[in-house]
Structure formats: structure tokens, C-alpha cells
Image (spheres, rainbow, N blue to C red):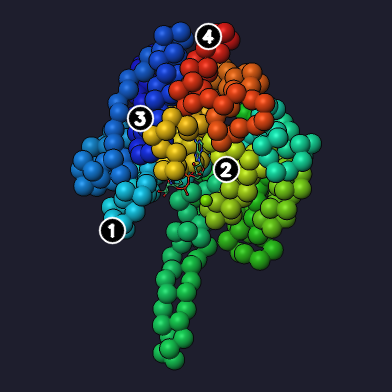
Amino acid sequence: MAAKKLLILPGDGIGVEVMAQVRRIIDWMARKRKIEFEITEGLIGGSSYDVHGTPLSDETLAAAMAADAVLLGAVGGPKWDDLPFDVKPERGLLKIRKEMGLFANLRPATVLEALADASTLKNEVVAGLDIMILRELTGGLYFGQPRGIDTLPDGTRKGYNTLVYTTPEIQRIGRVAFDLARKRNKKLCSVDKANVLECTVLWREEMIKLQKEEFPDVELSHMYVDNAAMQLVRNPKQFDVMVTENMFGDILSDCAAMLTGSLGMLPSASLGEADAQGRRKALYEPVHGSAPDIAGKDMANPLATIMSFAMCLRYSFDMAAEADLIENAVKNVLKGGLRTADIMQPGKAKVSTTVMGEAVVRELDKLN
Ligand code: NAI
Ligand code: MG
């Protein structure tokens, strides 16, 4: 089998620290599971600006386009806050996502048994929660034309954005959604606002068509987005895979993230169009940012980024067994009582980023 080409972009702040722990897991996979990785490391965000005067160099972008998958830490920090808009660290992230054509954003919200207390919701509502929100990332209200702020002849100002999707755009996100559902529990909920927005009437029609023609084994339901927000908080375990428009997905995925109560635990994946071999461009990153308040202190929780690497194995390399291994190692380490500061509970042992990373590797050894 050809070596897996991985581009690693630690970024800024705690991105660097959590990625160092992921490197250990990658080394472990190479040694113990004989997976051949070809690893390139690059700069993005503020650390790229400091060297190249741009948050995303052509070199890094070319490496991303050539890689089988990109692993990213986080970007940004106070050092770069006053830079012009175009060279801000966050622009590097937006640009790489756009250039790679990453239209499908996978945001799992999982409540590990050991952490059910971290949620502000009742234990019985969230314990065992395991849902996947799929957000369309390159279309919809955030990108539709026309958009802008105009001044009318009478001096009134008008601000507007447009919700637009074409059928190919709906179909490609739909296929990713049905595929995910097929590999999980064969249940997909498509979230729209078809009672008010024509664009999402089309969305719903296309999802129904896809189900009939290509995914008859997956059960499809529909829900209006306002109800979906309520249901996520009332009884989130009724869902399995949810798929939705860009802005709806932005809001619902953040809402679902907080059901877990632990920002430092949340991974994500963003996927692009499939090539002739069925392989997709892909970028894996934690949901959290660069956490300047704790950067450089060996305090950050590395588990979100470690679980992002597990998603990489699962979705880019079809290595479900290895992904499970990592996820189980994380579960066991938490069951054993180790906690970084962000998920600290009374009576548990507070540990550093490094110790948490080491513990996951030790657990992998036990499980292997
Ligand atoms: P943040 O996610 O960096 O931090 C929010 C809070 O959560 C902080 O108190 C932080 O200490 C804590 N936290 C985050 N990740 C943690 C982890 N792994 N372990 C322990 N604690 C953790 O969001 P914030 O503060 O709004 O933004 C800080 C910088 O990060 C800004 O420059 C922002 O633009 C950037 N950012 C970058 C993102 C990315 O690279 N994808 C996403 C969000 C923000
Ligand atoms: Mg958001």
C-alpha cells in the first residue's frame, strides 16, 4: 500500500502543543500497526505570517493539495490581532478550506461516559450521546449572491444576503450525509426551513430523491431548523446523523458541541469532492481555537486533536479499526480518572498536555 501523505499544520498557540501529542500517536501507528506515513510539516496562521508575511504561503497550499489529508491545530492569537484583515491568521484558514473545496463539515458531538458530568444538561439527557452534524460549508447564506449593504435614493440603507443552493451542491452534501448514515445507524435527519424558504424546499426535494434513488436502506426524516434546535436541547439522543445548510449548521453544530460541555474534546473533519478513486481532499482539526490564555503552559487538552486524527484514519484512510483503537484509548484514559484542567472534576487527577498524550499512547499499547 502506498504511504499515506499527511500534511501537519500545527499553527499557533496551543495548536503546536496538542499537535506534538498527535505526533506521538502517529509514530505509534507507524511502529505498532505498520502504517506507512509520509509526513510533511508546514506553517499556517500567525506563525506563517511571521516567516513569510502571509498566513498561508503558496508552498503550504501546494503541500495541502498534494496531501491525502491535512491535520491542523489552531491559528490566531493576540500577537496578530492588529494585522490588516487580509493577512490575519484566520484568513489563512479560510483560504485553505476554500482552495481545497471543503464543502462538507463533519462535527460529531459525543458524550463519553466518563464526562457526562461536564454537560450543563442532566446526565440522563446526554449520557452516551453520539451524533454527527454535517454542515454544508461552501454555499448557502454565507456565500450566496447578491449580498451587500446599499444606500437607496431616499437615503435608507439596505443590507442583504441570499440563500442559494444549486441541485449539484445539494446532491453532493446529501451523498456525504447518506454515506455517513449508512456507515452508522442508517438514520438521517435533514434540517431545513421548507415552510418559509424556497431554497430549502429544493433542498428537501433533492434529499427525498437521493434517498429513493441511491440510499433506500437509509431512513430519512425532515425537521425545521427551529424545532431541531429545541429538540437538540430537549432530547438530543433522538438524532444520529443530521445534515443542513451552512448557517443552520454553524448554529446547530455549536449548540450540539455545548451539549458535551467540553470544547477541548471536540474533533471535526472537512471533506471535498471525491476524485475518480473515490478519495476526497480532507482537513481534520479540533473545534477549539489557539487558546492564548493557556498557550505555552502545557495545560491544553490534546484529546480533540487526537480524536481529529482518529477521524482522519476513519474517513480518509478507511481504517476504522485504528480509529476505534484511538477512541477507546481516550475513553479508557478518562475512565481511569486523568483530566486536563478544562475537564477537571473533583477527585480526579489533573494532568498536563504531555502526560495526557503519554497516557493515550500507553493505553494504545494495552489495547493493541
Ligand atoms: P478558543 O477556542 O481558543 O478558547 C476558548 C476558551 O476555551 C479559552 O478559555 C481556552 O483556554 C479554552 N480552550 C480551548 N481549547 C482548549 C483545549 N484544547 N484545552 C483546554 N482549554 C481549551 O477560542 P477564543 O478564545 O475565542 O479564540 C482564541 C484565538 O483562537 C483567536 O485568535 C481566534 O481567532 C482563534 N480561533 C481559531 C480557531 C481555529 O483555528 N479553528 C477557532 C476559534 C478561534
Ligand atoms: Mg461557529
Q: Position of residue 195 (x, y in %)?
A: 69, 63
Single out the mark in the foreground, 2 or 3. Answer: 3
- Give the camera-side residue of 60 and 67: 60
Instruction: Report the residue at 60% width, 38% height from top.
Output: 262
Figure quadrant of the C terminus: top right
Q: Position of residue 105 (x, y in %)?
A: 51, 42
Label 2 and label 3: CA atoms lie apart by 24 Å
Q: Residue furthest right?
A: 124
Residue beneath disc 4: 365
Q: Is residue 320 at least partly visible in the picture? A: no
Q: Amino acid at mark 3?
A: Ile
What amino acid type is highlighted by mark number 1? Pro
- Rounded to the nearest angstrom, the CA distance separating label 1 from label 4 is 47 Å
- Mark 1 packing: few (<14 Cα in 10 Å), some, or many (20+)? few
* Residue bearing mark 2: 134
Do callouts 2 and 4 mark residues in contact (Cβ within 8 Å)?
no
Please name the residue that numbered disc 1 is placed on. Answer: 84
Position of 153 relative to 304 (above/below) = below
Between disc 1 and disc 4, whose residue precedes? 1
Nearest the viewer among 212 and 314 is 314
Of the residues under marks 4 and 3, which one precedes in the sequence?
3
Please name the residue that numbered disc 3 is placed on. 8
What residue is shown at x 66% (from left), y 60% (from top)? 194
Amino acid type at image mark 4: Asp
- In this orientation, does residue 28 appear? yes
Report, in whole angstroms, how far the alpha carbon at label 2 lies from the one at label 4: 33 Å
- Other-residue count near label 2 (Cα within 10 Å), few / some / many at <14 / 14–19 / ≥20: many
Give the residue at the far left of this rendering: 52
Query: Residue 35 location in percent, x, y?
Result: 42, 13
Viewer-nearest of discs 2 and 4: 4
Image depth: mark 4 or mark 3 in front = 4
